Image (tube, helix red, strand yellow):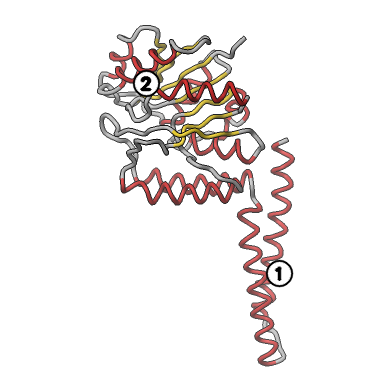
Amino acid sequence: MAEKLSVIIPAYNEEKGITDVLEGIKSELKKLSRKSEIIVVDDGSGDRTTEAVKKADGVRLIKHGRNMGYGSSLKTGIKSSDGEWILITDADGTYPPKHIPDLVKKMEEGGYDMVVGARTGKHVHVPLARRPAKWMLGKMANYVAKGKVRDINSGMRIFRKELAMKYFNLFPPGFSFTSTITLAAFCNGYSVVYIPIDYMKRVGKSTMRFSNFVGFVNLMIKLALYFRPIRVFGPIGTLLILGGMLWGLYQFLLSANIAQMPVIMFLSGLQIFLLGLIADAISATRSN
């Protein structure tokens, strides 16, 4: 029997676009030969988002009493869902519902743990101001995951519910849910594949701020320390070891004597490197 699909949509002040999004999703779900449900989590909206969702037939509404964040909304939806497969998308019209059958088909064909819509299609509207941050986050993700992460924080993807539940306590309340589940899957041997999708101009006002980018960077460092600590401690330790050796060699050749600082650098680097190896071994044991 085909796995049931739960579509989860976090919504915060999305009255202008959510009706069209829901109608588009319902239309695409009718093309699939599997049971499905649509869950909208209204994250404490101050507009008429709730009223718009209530007018849509066949949609389950869950309300937060206050604004708790994108990640919290997804976690609420996942806990309340009945499906073995979870599909997440946004309520602002940026992710075209037409890609839902493509994501489901790819999941069916390959038996993957997660299929992500990479925003590399024919029509991609990424604000110019966000592109440097997106590029930087991508490079950081590739380094931590030791692989090609084509779109770390795409908000349109399908994944197995069991994958989300395994790392449920790691998911932050804010915008970093998608980044966290991506790195969790890559760093722990889950099968992840990307397909190209379009990304349209949003309907309504964006809630993204510069502080979100700072939070992303902070999270990337935390995730690296959690999943791949050697990728953080290793380079730092290696630089200190090499720096101490070169500085010590320079001093020895210059005066046949080595001062304390090169020795301290060398020993500190060695300790940091060994700490990284120990942390990496613990991380590997924890993940199994």
Residue under numbered circle 2 = 42
Question: Which residue sits at x=62%, y=53%?
Answer: 231
First in residue order: circle 2 vs circle 1: 2
Residue 143 image offset from top left, x and y in percent: 57, 51
Q: Residue at x 56, y 34 (%)?
A: 193
- Disc 1 marks a residue whose amino acid type is Leu
In three-dimensional space, the C-alpha distance between marks 2 and 1, rounded to whole angstroms, equals 54 Å
Image label count: 2
| Crowd tier of the residue under label 1, counting other residues whose Cα lies within 10 Å: few below 14, some 14–19, many 20 or above | some
In-image side of 263 versus 91 (left or right): right
Read off the residue under disc 1: 267
Residue 19 placement, left or right of 87 = left
> Where is residue 88 shown, x and y percent of the image?
46, 25
Q: Position of residue 111 (x, y in %)?
A: 63, 24
Residue furthest toward the top? 57
Could you say which disc has been placed on residue 229 in the image? none
